[in-house]
C-alpha cells in the first residue's frame, strides 16, 4: 500500500533480472502504518492524493484511480497497512517452499490493483480475503493464516529486520555484503545507476 513502491514496481522487475546470478534478492515488509480502526483525517486524505499526483508527474506510466478518495465515505480510508502486509505473509505460506514466492507476488499484485486501479480498501480484511480467492487460494484457510499469531510474529520480525538494515523509507534498496549494509538510491526510470552502485559496492567490499 505504498504508492511509491507501486511506482517502482516495473523498474524493480527489470533490476532483478539484471542482478548478478549469484546475488539473492529478498523482499522485506517494512510495515509502514500500524493497525487502526480510526477514519483517516481529511488533511491526510488530501496529502496522499497530492502524493499520487506527484507520482503521476514523475513516473508517466503510472495512473491512479481517484475514486478511492472521491468516494471516501464508501471506501472508508484508514491509515493502516499492516493488514495488507499480513496478507502478503499469509499468501506466502501457500507457496510450495520458502524459495517459491508465487502466491506472495500474486497477492502483492492483487492488493496494488485493488487499491490503485479499482478503488478498494486493502486495510479491510474482507477485501484481502476476497483477493485471496481471486488468486486461487482457499479463502477460509487464508483467513485463518491472515489472523494467526504466526503471521503477526513474522511481520514483527520483518519490520525489525528492515530497521536493522536502515531501510526506513519506502521503497528502499539495501545491499548486504558480508555483514555490512549499503543503501542503494532508487531510480524510478532506469536501472543503470542502481546497477552501477551495486557493482561498485561489491568491488569495494
Image (cartoon, rainbow, N blue to C red):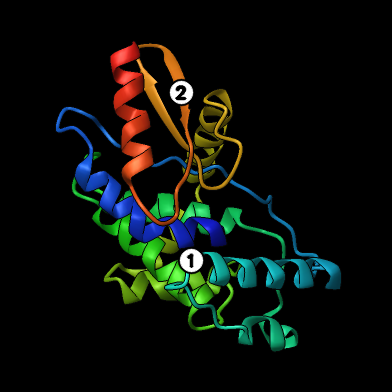
In the rendered image, the vertical position of residue 121 relative to residue 102, given as above or below? below
Q: Secondary structure at mark 2?
A: strand
Q: Is residue 201 left or right of residue 136?
A: right
Please tell me the numbered disc located at residue 59. 1
Q: Nearer the viewer, residue 107 or 166?
A: 166
Name the quadrant containing residue 204. Answer: top left
**Is 65 left or right of 134, judged from the image as shown?**
right
- Whether residue 26 is visible here, answered yes or no, is no
Is residue 89 in view? yes
181 left or right of 96 in image: right
**Rendered residue at 46%/68% (across/down):** 112
**Vertical placement of 23 versus 63: above or below?**
above
Depth check: 153 or 21 in front?
A: 21
**Quarter that holds the N terminus:** bottom right
Residue 85, percent from left and from top: 51, 52
Query: Closest to the observer: 154 or 183?
Result: 183
Give the CA distance from mark 2 to mark 1: 25 Å
In the figure, is residue 102 to the left or right of 85?
A: left
Say which residue label 2 marks: 182
Q: Report x, y in % for residue 50.
A: 71, 70
The residue located at (62%, 83%) in the rendering is: 66
Q: Are marks 2 and 1 in contact (CB under 8 Å)?
A: no
Amino acid at each position: 500500500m505504498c504508492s511509491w513502491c507501486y511506482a517502482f514496481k516495473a523498474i524493480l522487475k527489470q533490476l532483478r533480472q539484471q542482478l548478478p546470478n549469484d546475488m539473492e534478492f529478498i523482499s522485506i515488509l517494512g510495515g509502514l502504518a500500524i493497525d487502526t480502526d480510526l477514519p483517516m483525517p481529511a488533511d491526510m486524505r488530501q496529502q496522499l492524493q497530492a502524493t499520487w499526483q506527484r507520482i503521476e508527474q514523475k513516473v508517466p506510466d503510472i495512473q491512479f484511480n481517484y475514486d478511492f478518495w472521491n468516494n471516501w465515505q464508501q471506501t472508508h480510508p484508514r491509515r493502516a497497512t499492516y493488514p495488507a502486509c499480513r496478507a502478503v505473509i499469509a499468501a506466502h505460506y501457500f507457496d510450495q517452499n520458502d524459495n517459491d514466492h508465487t502466491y506472495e507476488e500474486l497477492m502483492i499484485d492483487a492488493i496494488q490493483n485493488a487499491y490503485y486501479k479499482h478503488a478498494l480498501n486493502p486495510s479491510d480484511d474482507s477485501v484481502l480475503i476476497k483477493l485471496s480467492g481471486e488468486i486461487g487460494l482457499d479463502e477460509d484457510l487464508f483467513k485463518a493464516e491472515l489472523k494467526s499469531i504466526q503471521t503477526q510474529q513474522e511481520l514483527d520480525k520483518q519490520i525489525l529486520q528492515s530497521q536493522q538494515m536502515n531501510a526506513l523509507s519506502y521503497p528502499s534498496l539495501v545491499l548486504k555484503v558480508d555483514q555490512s549494509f549499503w543503501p542503494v538510491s532508487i531510480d524510478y526510470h532506469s536501472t543503470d545507476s542502481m546497477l552501477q552502485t551495486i557493482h561498485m559496492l561489491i568491488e569495494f567490499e
